Image: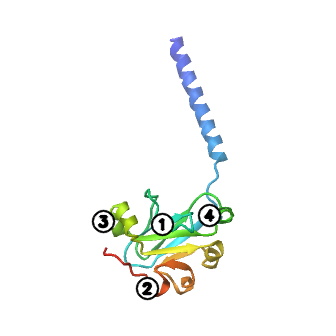
Amino acid sequence: MQDIHFLKKNTKMKIAQCFLLMILLCKTCKFPDEGSFFTMVNNANHPISHYIDFFYPDTIIVLDKPYIYVTQPISSKKDADWGTWEERFSKIEKISIFIFHTDTLNKYTWDEVRERYMVLKRYDLNLNDLKRLDFKISYPLTEAMKDIKQYPPYDDNGKPGYPL
């Protein structure tokens, strides 16, 4: 009987220790702050998917499929990552945001998407571009975005050069 009492007491002690450890670990984590967010605005009548690449001037689509963010039609989605934009741009000149038709990613393999460069739009942005846009990236692009470096170029009206 004494052994059971000891086990119950020991189990309660371990639970309390785990709980305290979790509190300490969570307290030391840095969550994204306002300086790390941007908003993807989808003004199209279909869902779009995007990822951010930090290897500019290399604008090739990455070999391994990255985490893809999806924004539903006529909506916006706030995305975040760790660190501030100032921290990121202290080491790089620009970021590239690759935007895809979500149906394209569902229909084709990542290798096909890469090989045929099946992007709806790619924006190459520096920190001043993001600030000027108030950290809001739109697809299709807005008049405010026409001077942003992009592919296909602005005068192509953003039409993809491949079948969906």
Give the mark nearest the N terminus, 4 or 2: 4
Separation of marks 1 and 3 at Cα, in angstroms: 20 Å
Marks 1 and 2 in Cβ contact (< 8 Å): no
Give the mark nearest the N terminus, 1 or 2: 1
Residue at disc 1, secondary structure: loop
Q: Which mark is residue 60?
A: 1
Give the mark nearest the N terminus, 4 or 3: 4
Separation of marks 4 and 3 at Cα, in angstroms: 32 Å
11 shown above or below 3: below
Give the mark nearest the N terminus, 1 or 3: 1
Residue at disc 4, secondary structure: helix
> For the point 55% across and 73% down, which residue is it?
124
Q: Which residue is mark 3?
A: 107
Q: Foreground: 152 or 35?
A: 152
Marks 2 and 3 in Cβ contact (< 8 Å): no
Q: Which residue is mark 4?
A: 36
Q: Which residue is mark 2?
A: 157
Separation of marks 4 and 1 at Cα, in angstroms: 24 Å
Marks 4 and 2 in Cβ contact (< 8 Å): no
Percent of width and height locating residue 65: 43, 58
Q: Foreground: 26 or 92?
A: 92
Q: Residues within 10 Å of mark 1 (few under 14, many from 20)?
A: some
> For the point 62% across and 63% down, which residue is it?
36
Q: Foreground: 101 or 31?
A: 101
Three-letter code, disc 4: Ser
